[in-house]
Image (spheres, helix red, strand yellow):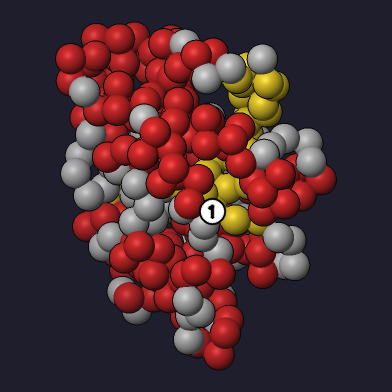
Amino acid sequence: MIDLRVNVFNTSSNLPLLAALQAGDFEREGLRVEVQHTPNSDEQRAGLAAGRFEIAHAAVDNAVALIESGTDAVIVCGGDAGLNDFIVRPEIGSFADLRGGKLAVDAPNTAYALAAKKILKDRGLLEGRDYQVKLAGGTGPRAAALASDPELACGMINPPFNFKLRAQGLKSLGTQFDLLGPYQATGAYVMRSWAQAHAQTLTAYLRAYVSGQRRVMDRAHRADMLALLTANFKLEGQAAENTYEALLTEGSGLARDAAFNAEGFDRVLSIRAEMEGMWGGRPPAAQRYVDLSFYQRALAQG
């Protein structure tokens, strides 16, 4: 058995990973997978660069940020489109009501924080002038902060935490997909040198991961998936069902076979260029950040 350490945020986007583990897909590939949960994206990026684990699953803009910092990471597959809701406190009725409030984020300059800032900018709201940003951790801690801290007006929250917040009286001003369009969110990224030195291991991992993604998206396994969601996220009936349906929503949920969304990734890069002023405002070619050869080999062999 080959040991692999996989680092993730504790969200429902990882249901394919949980499903593959439960079904023994990794074991059949000769892999023993240890799942680690990260509290935030800064620690995940630093952990991958330091070799504390081999594979990370998160919004792939984190990989872009890591690569731009001089670390030779690479994105190796897709996963989903984010599934985020733009969640606001109960007293907020519209985007205009967010003036003077604070946006809860994991990190101020990556992934869903940039997506939220773009959504707000498109509606006439600018950071520093109309709202402030406050660090609140990954999705779980961020959701808890939104529920308990009246200073926080809004945040991007994905399942199951968005459904938990709505049950507590918070509300959504729309999904990320409706407000922003196609977006390549969760994907797997690794160090490029590790991928090149362990090509067969990475291919085997992706083959098992795709098997898990297929199992989640096959409604014949719905009962098993609801049980996994309930057990791993301490959900009650309706929240588990809502989360499962969100995962299977075409366009905004899981991508079939964990495919990489090229159009969505172009959106990721264009948002980073616009909101962070990088690359002179003109995003570079996606090939700099992505190597799908291991994924394509996994599909061909699967």
Tell me what residue is drawn at x 51 percent, y 79 percent: 284
Whole-percent x and y of residue 202? 58, 37
Residue closest to the far right: 50
Whole-percent x and y of residue 262? 35, 62
Which one is nearer the viewer's eye here, 157 or 185? 185
Q: Quadrant of residue 295?
A: top left
Q: Is 143 on the left-hand or right-hand side of 218?
A: right
Return the residue at label 1: 75
Tell me what residue is drawn at x 32 percent, y 75 percent: 122
Q: Is residue 190 above or below residue 231?
A: below
> For the N terminus, which image quadrant?
top right
Tell me what residue is drawn at x 34 percent, y 47 percent: 259
Q: Quadrant of residue 213?
A: top left
What is the three-letter code of the residue carrying label 1?
Ile
Q: Is 63 on the left-hand or right-hand side of 206?
A: right
Do we see residue 12 in this rendering? no
Which one is nearer the viewer's eye here, 257 or 238? 257
SS at badge 1: strand
Q: Is residue 21 above or below residue 180?
A: above
Q: Residues within 10 Å of mark 1 (few under 14, many from 20)?
A: many
Whole-percent x and y of residue 144? 52, 34
